Each structure stands twice: as C-alpha cells, then as structure tokens.
Amino acid sequence: MKLNVRESGEGDKIAVLIHGFNCDSGDWWELTPELLRRGYHVKAVDLRGHGHSPRATSYTLPEYAADVVETIGESPELIIGHSLGAQVTALTVPELLPSKAIYFDPPWSLPEEGAPNLFPDLSAIPSMTDEELAATLRHDFPAWSEKAIEVDVASWRLWDPATAATITDVRLSGMPERALVPSLAIAAEKDTVFAAKDHATAQERGFVVRLAPGLTHSLFRDDFDLVLSLISDWL
C-alpha cells in the first residue's frame, strides 16, 4: 500500500519518520524543522489506517512495514520511529538499510503483572467532541503544550479505530535480535514500554540506550528540548 507522506526539505539526506499508534505524521511538527536545519529531506509517513493514508481490512506489523518499504523505496540516511512506529522501524531496517535508526520508547518489554495499561479502551473517542478530547489530554498530560494537544486531537479525528487490533501484536513482537545498523533507543523513565530491566539486553544486541529522565511514553510531547538533547549527536 502506498502511504500518504508529509514531505519537506530539499537536503541530500533522507530522514523517514514513523509515528506511533493512533497518531500520524503531524506528530513531528517540532522535530522536522530541526532536521531541515541539518540538511535533511524529511519524509514523514502516515501508517495505514492513520492520517490521510488508506484504511485497510487488516493491520499487522509486517503490513505496516511493507507499506513503508513500498512507499519510501530507497535507503535513507535516518529512520526514526516512536512506539508502534519503532516496531515498524525494526522491520523496515533490514529492507531499507538506513545509515542509522532512532527508536523512541520502543515496546520491547512485556507488561508486568499489575502494571497500568498504556493502551486503554479508545472506543469512546469517535463520539467525543474536539473540546472534550482536548480537555482529556490536558488532564492526563499536563506537561503538553496546546499545540501538542491540537495535533493529537487532529490525528484522532483521522484515525481508524480498527487499528487497535495491532496492540497485542506490537507488545508481543519483542526486541530485535541485533541492531543491523547503528541504532539509538530512547527509553522513557515513566509509563514506559521499554523497561530498565531490558536495557542491558538491548545494549548486548548492539543498541545504544539512553534514558529520558522524568518523561513518559509520550517523550517529545512531554519535553521536546530534552529529547532533542538526547538525540542531537545522532542527527
């Protein structure tokens, strides 16, 4: 499936950006200008069932990855993926062979017994007004800016709830056996899906692991400047 791509810049280095679950390419509104300043040609995709990409009858990790490979079709300098997008990144790396990859809070740890569910029932979203959605985000994520809230509400309006079937697939797919290209994994300290107990394993498999202190799974929505400081030398 050919995906919608939010494309910007004319640099000679391609950066592919892959958003997380129930989000879209609008997620990268802060990172994109930074990449443009560094000479990148940015290609931010909308995964199937997200943003302005087509809806589908099936949503699996291999299908998400195949769509990205078909859409991009060449080896980029950099791939960055967040959450679901991080798992998609792991599956596209062997095909696209980027020069380097960055994983934002990749879901490489199974939830421990009694841990809160980071992917709650979202079935009520379609019936909520934009104002109700925004109010919910302000309550749940007080560190987010109004722009981050606006972008998230807009992405929910374009999201196919049927993609929720992907979540179990994402959490059970696990960590790649090894890093095929230079790879940086940023782990959230709070509400993470990449627990501290698994950081050493990731390092043994060739991933550079850095902790984002005080941040949640949302990472760059919580504190973009901190996240940028953690990845700047990799851009």
Image: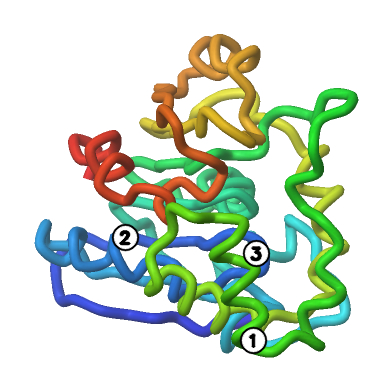
- List x then y, in percent, for residue 184: 40, 32
At label 1, the amino acid type is Leu
- Horizontal side, residue 205 vs residue 157: left or right: left
Is residue 150 visible in the rendered image? The answer is yes
- Horizontal side, residue 27 vs residue 171: left or right: left
Mark seen at residue 15: 2
Tags 1 and 3 touching, CB below 8 Å: no
Q: Quadrant of the C terminus?
A: top left
Q: Residue at x 43, y 22 (%)?
A: 209
Q: Nearer the viewer, residue 114 or 12?
A: 114
Where disc 1 sits, the SS reads: helix
Q: Residue at x 47, y 76 (%)?
A: 151
Residue 50 found in image quarter: bottom right
Crowding at dot 1, Cα within 10 Å, few <14 / some 14-19 / many 20+, comes out as some
Tags 2 and 1 touching, CB below 8 Å: no
Residue 208 found in image quarter: top left
Q: CA distance from mark 1 to mark 3?
A: 21 Å
Crowding at dot 3, Cα within 10 Å, few <14 / some 14-19 / many 20+, comes out as some
Where disc 3 sits, the SS reads: helix
At label 2, the amino acid type is Ala
Q: Earlier in the sequence, mark 2 or mark 1?
A: 2
The residue under label 3 is 66
The residue under label 1 is 158
- List x then y, in percent, for residue 28: 38, 66
